Amino acid sequence: MIQITLPDQSVKEFPEGVTGLDIAKSISEGLARNVLSITVNGEVWDLDIPIHQDATIKLNTWDDKEGKATFWHSSAHVMAAAIEELYPGTKFGIGPDIENGFYYDIDLGDRSISSNDFEKIENKMLEIAKRKEPFQRREIPKQEAMAYFREKGDEYKLDLINDLEDGTISLYESGGFTDLCRGPHLPDTGPIKAVKLLNTAGAYWRGDEQSKQLTRVYGITFPKKKMLNEYLELLEEAKKRDHRKIGREMELFAFSAKVGQGLPLWLPKGAEMRENLENFLKKVQREAGYQPVITPHIGHKNLYLTSGHYEKYGEDSFRPITTPSEGEEFFLKPMNCPHHCEIFKNKQYSYKDLPIRLAEFGTVYRYEQSGELHGLTRVRGFTQDDAHIFCRPEQVKEEFTAVIDIVLHIFRALDFTNYSAQISLRDPDNKEKYIGSDENWEKAEKAIIEATSEKGLQAEIVTGEAAFYGPKLDFMVKDALGRSWQLGTIQVDYNLPERFDLEYIGQDNQRHRPVMLHRAPFGSMERFVAVMIEHCAGNFPLWLTPDQAIVLPISEKYEKYGKKVLELLKKYDIRTLIDERSEKTGKKIRDAETRKIPYMLIVGEKEEAEGTVSVRKHGKGDLGTLNIEDFVEMVNEEIAQFTRK
RNA sequence: GCCGAUGUAGCUCAGUUGGUCAGAGCAGCUGAUUUGUAAUCAGCUGGCCGGGGGUUCGAAUCCCUCCAUCGGCUCCA
């Protein structure tokens, strides 16, 4: 007998060789029907693999991440089986499960596949699913596996096996399709009840741009038809939040092929919003001891030779700007740090002066590959809410903490909760890849970890992800479709102070090297606004939104009073519009609602007589009648709630 | 940059196999209406069908090419 520990810590005895399915059956019939895989001591297994030793287990169903993973991984095999049947001779790369579904990379030779073929493949998959084809695991010697795939002509699988260690290789066979696979899989294809292929894409073999490009087919499957429909509805809903769509509808920004791709045009309302964000941060930064600076949009080639950016990115930048006669070369500035280093160098600093915090909303230009451009989240010209802090090594932690405070304050003011944090440290096994002394690295990494945890910030620590010049803390946010974007960042840099030979005079009257911190709480104005839009679906916090209120006179008769209200509110700095069209009130309300204007102020006979407004809140409805002063107070209180520290 | 798809009025979309196929709704403009918490009515103006080239008696429709956009890949100082 062996001891099996269940997730609730209870321990049950089973005969040696018991399988996941046996355990599920012993608990309940229902569980046995729904279980998809089993986690044994942290490893996910097939349900029919015998367990020979005491173990801690978890039975995975659709409600578990691991259960879904098993389900989708098996679905990838079913899709491959369907494709092999429909398109004989297809070669297969890899086919993993992903966050939402799965994909398979395939090489169709001269043929191609498009969304027109999806239905055919989906039907074939459902056919295979219905047959309840078992997934059969086989373990064979490496040589035998190679022989099999060599005969099949599947060079990609051979490539994969080549990299595996000698010994036994596991294969799974189902529905006539045999795949190199570690598993685990469902017992059979039966649970797959709904299938949807989503799209195709090109994907380089092994992610290498030099390798052959395969066709990646994305799909998703569900154990119930209803779940598929719900998922598709969810996708539709997400599309409605797309910042590109809302940005156009709310007239925030636009692009023009004539101006150039990836170069956003901020429209009046978008510019208003961006200015509100900038002013908000400027105030916070002023209070935190930052000094604004302004630097040009271009810089001499020598600047980037010194910074090292020329060597690393020179070839992939916009081509240099040259002068008519002397043949000098200038680059559009791709970042602000070198300029700021030169500002620091402009003056001699004592240790007593540090830290020096130089801030600039600096517009930079980077040549991004055309296929990379994406709305406002990936552009070629953008403005960073940049600042560089020059400090003594022992000040790193304190400064880091202060920056985290700013980031969290901003996120709170924007009602932003859907972010995650990542600490990137150097790879301790490859220290030679990084610049800077061991001592400084250790100090900085420790400072970041401590500062983060002292702020109660949940951060994932990833080693080997640090920049070559220093460790960093990034804030990531997901867009409407679940794609992850990096926003705010705080980076420690030992490289640029070295390259620019930055110094301060220490207490010992010796020259010392300052540490540099790069930080941008928003990341870039463009990306931040994009993510902000998707986060709140265009319903911005009151303090940020371009138009805060709109006056809606019931009829022409009350226009005069409406204008009076408008002027009064403007005096109180409430951004207000008026709708003087000859339309019915219902129509004016409807239009204001679609424009996502937070407050609608309806004025008619009663309001004019009493000097009041009838307040309607966007998405909420009628709030009743208020004095104008009371309304102003209500608005100010709502704004203060978010923006006060 | 690569793979695949898309591009018709300001916006969202119809346009069968090439032959009154240049259309609709919303928006806009003009009038009428004077309106009380999500759409008042009528009339009208909008398009070289992404640009260029070709095939054809004839092209929004077929082919080539360029541009832009979308979904991925690669990249992201």
Image (cartoon, rainbow, N blue to C red):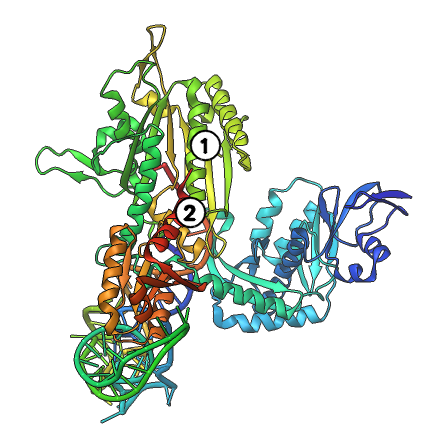
Q: Residue at x 34, y 23 (%)?
A: A390
**How far across and down, in percent of the image, does residue A27 sit?**
84, 55
The reply to whether label 1 and label 2 mark residues of one chain is yes
Q: Amino acid at mark 1?
A: Lys
Camera sees residue A311: no
B63 to A316, vertically: above or below = below
Q: Which of A349 and A17 lies nearest the eye of the viewer?
A: A349
A547 to B39, vertically: above or below = above
Quadrant of the rendering where the C terminus of chain A is positioned: top left
Q: Marks 1/2: CA distance?
A: 23 Å
Secondary structure under badge 2? loop
Local packing at callout 2 (Cα closer than 10 Å; few below 14, some 14-19, many 20+) is many
Q: Which residue bears the numbered disc 1?
A: A472
Q: Which of A135 and A287 lies nearest the eye of the viewer?
A: A287
Q: Quadrant of residue A303?
A: top left
**How far across and down, in percent of the image, does residue A505 sit?**
31, 11
Q: Which mark is residue A115?
A: none
Query: Residue at the left extreme?
Result: A325
Local packing at callout 1 (Cα closer than 10 Å; few below 14, some 14-19, many 20+) is many
Quadrant of the rendering where the N terminus of chain A is positioned: top right
Q: Which mark is residue A414?
A: 2
Q: Earlier in the sequence, mark 1 or mark 2?
A: 2
